[in-house]
Amino acid sequence: MNKQGPKWLTKLLVALAAVGFGLQAPLANQASPNATPIVAQAAKHHRHRSQTDAQLAQLDYQGSQIIDVNNGQPTFSQKDLDTSHGAWQKYGSLDSLNRATSANALLNKSLMPTTEREPLTINPTGWHNKRIASGYLYNRSHLIGYQLTGQNNNWKNLITGTRSLNDPSMTRYEDVVADYLKANPQAYVRYQVTPVFRGNERLARGVHMQAQSVGSNAISYNVYIFNVQDGVKLNYQDGTSKVTKSARTTQQKASPAVANQSASTSSASTQNNQETVYITATGHRYHFDPNCRGLSNAKSVTSIPLSQAQAEGYTKCGFE
């Protein structure tokens, strides 16, 4: 017998190998039919699911500030959803660059604050704040919002986030959880927020947020929010920034009347920035009128300068 085996066997093996490679090659080059919206919306050049924080860090903003991760489905295990030990909160240690790393909690109404909110004074990594046309560029952004766990100057729970990231983007997801817990005092929500950094950059590229109500789907989301601001180019390495050319051009093309009005508004805004506004222990809006109906149910009200309220991420009450 030939040492290499019968010719018919050799031909059969060659044929099978060819069929095998022929089946594998097309699959390797096809996008999964179950590809998540995160691929479709934010990174069309990524063929595989981008679900890990390391993969999220490589995504570039392409016009949609909020995108789904894992089709919007949270990835908590049954162990993660265990309520036998009651409500809790835990914050990851700062990394070697002093960046916040993670925030986890099993939320319940019992964790929600009942005391006055303190002014935020610490400066997270990448903090190079400045005024832009819409107000302050950056907020000291809580990973887990103050209204949920009452954390104030906790280094492990604060990052430098654009106004757009902090409010309305993160706030909209925090609000639905807060409203649910207030309406259901015995309920629990598993909650996780992770700041996503690229390499050694000091300014986060975004935040990965997911939440799941235990025993129901009343709360269920898994999203990634880009840390961006319209009209501003951010340097993620250190947090410095520049107003984009397109934004400057838009301002320059405004009519003289509009330009003069803008200048007057800016001057007035500087003066008004020292005005006193009113905040509550659990809210995230500021109020010019201490008798505003938005404060009617507040247990306590604190007065602070408008500039401080804006820098800390408070936004104007909708009733005024």
Image (cartoon, grey):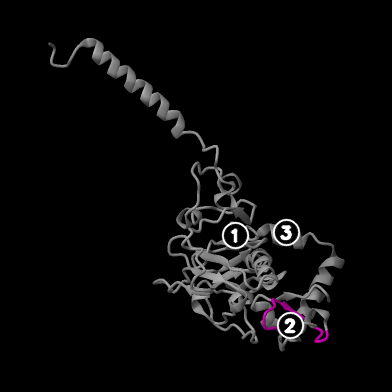
Residue drawn where x is 84% and y is 62% of the image: 255
Q: CA distance from mark 2 to mark 3?
A: 26 Å
Residue 236 vs 156, above or below: the answer is: above
Q: Is residue 143 visible?
A: no
Q: Considering only order in the chain, which callout, 3 or 1, is on the residue closer to the N terminus?
A: 1
Q: Is residue 188 visible?
A: yes
The image quadrant that residue 139 belongs to is bottom right
Residue 169: percent from left, percent from top: 66, 63
Residue 272: percent from left, percent from top: 77, 83
Q: Which residues are magenta?
A: 280-291
Q: Amino acid at mark 3?
A: Thr
Residue drawn where x is 71% and y is 86% of the image: 305
Confirm or deny contact between disc 1 and disc 2 (CB under 8 A).
Answer: no
Residue 120 vs 252, above or below: the answer is: below
Please give the label number shown on residue 273.
2
Please give the label number shown on residue 249.
3
Residue drawn where x is 70% and y is 71% of the image: 183
Q: CA distance from mark 1 to mark 3?
A: 28 Å
> Which residue, given by chain and number where applicable, does mark 1 sit on?
225
